[in-house]
Amino acid sequence: MRFAAVLVAALTILAPLRAGAAERAFVLPAPAYDPPAASGGKQKLVVAGGCFWGVQGVFQRVKGVSRAVSGYAGGAKETARYEKVSRGDTGHAESVEITYDPKMVSLGDLLRVYFSVAHDPTQLNRQGPDAGAQYRSTIFIANAEQEKAARDYIAQLSEAKTFSAPIVTTLEPLRAFYPAEAYHQDYLLRHPAQPYIVYNDLPKIDDLKRLFPSLYRESPALTN
């Protein structure tokens, strides 16, 4: 009970700060280059931008996304476990694999949400309270089309000085994606009252609904 009381008091104090943080997100211009929908069916994009709970939660509510899975990318299979990745020296980043229908949502739309709502691309090796290389801002490139779209959009936003600080997002080749442990999947949806989620991640969902209403879906795409 004592812990619960302290927790409630802390959240009450932080509420105005949480609201302010949510207001920092803003609509970004559409990418000048947005690949047309291919005829090959569903596609995948792997991104990293801080704790995967919030990033997964955001993309689960984007129309056209059929699945968003929390996991690890950038390191070896042997170290793709939470207790090892958390050390920050495995090369892995907490990542999310997004499966989407390009006829319903474009790669450019996903990049807009990623840079605007899902995380802050100006924070180097950290997001909010989480610090370390495992929380870096990275797009894991699977093909030439993804590389051109991501590289061109970063250049477009940088040249326009869209953000008040430089974009530090890196582009890394996608060698493999390893799904995270079951208890990390759908974490935001299963623990909406958890203080970390309330303070850091629920505002992202509000931002998605507020800034990109045409992309927002009420029913999230569950992992299982």
Image (tube, rainbow, N blue to C red):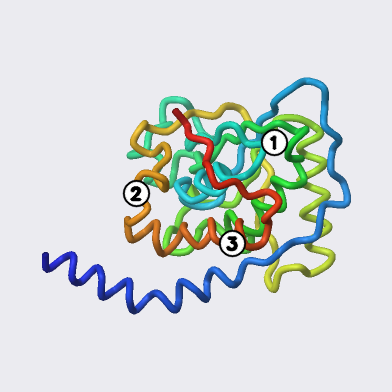
**Residues at marks 1 and 3 touching, judged by CB atoms closer than 8 Å:** no
Question: How busy is the neighbourhood of tag 3: few (under 14 within 10 Å), some, or many (20 plus)?
Answer: many
State the mark number for residue 191.
2
Q: In 3D space, how far apart are the residues under numbered discs 1 and 2 (Cα atoms)? A: 31 Å
Q: Report whether 54 appears left or right of 137.
A: left
Q: Secondary structure at mark 1?
A: strand
Which residue is at the far front? Answer: 218
Label 3 sits on residue: 207
Label 1 and label 3: CA atoms lie apart by 26 Å
Q: As rendered, which of 76 and 56 lies closer to the eye?
A: 56
Query: In the rendered view, does 155 fall on the left or right side of 171?
Result: right
> Disc number at residue 141?
1
Q: Residues within 10 Å of mark 2 (few under 14, many from 20)?
A: few
Q: Secondary structure at mark 3?
A: helix
On the image, which quarter does residue 8 sit in? Answer: bottom left
Amino acid on which disc 1 is placed: Ile
165 and 193: which is toward the camera: 193
Label 2 to label 3: alpha-carbon separation = 19 Å
Q: Position of residue 93 (x, y in %)?
A: 51, 43
Which residue corresponds to the image point at 33% horizontal and 39% vertical from the top-left? 83
Q: Residues within 10 Å of mark 1 (few under 14, many from 20)?
A: many
In primary-sequence order, the first of circles 2 and 3 is 2
Report x, y in % for residue 38: 82, 27
SS for callout 2: loop
The quadrant of the rendering that contains the N terminus is bottom left
First reached walking from the N terminus: tag 1 or tag 2: 1
Task: Name the quadrant of the C terminus.
Answer: top left
Kind of residue at disc 3: Asp
**Can residue 74 be seen in this snapshot?**
no
Q: Does 45 appear above or below 53?
A: above
Q: Residue at x 74, y 22 (%)?
A: 41
Indicate the position of residue 136 as horizontal and vertical percent values: 55, 51
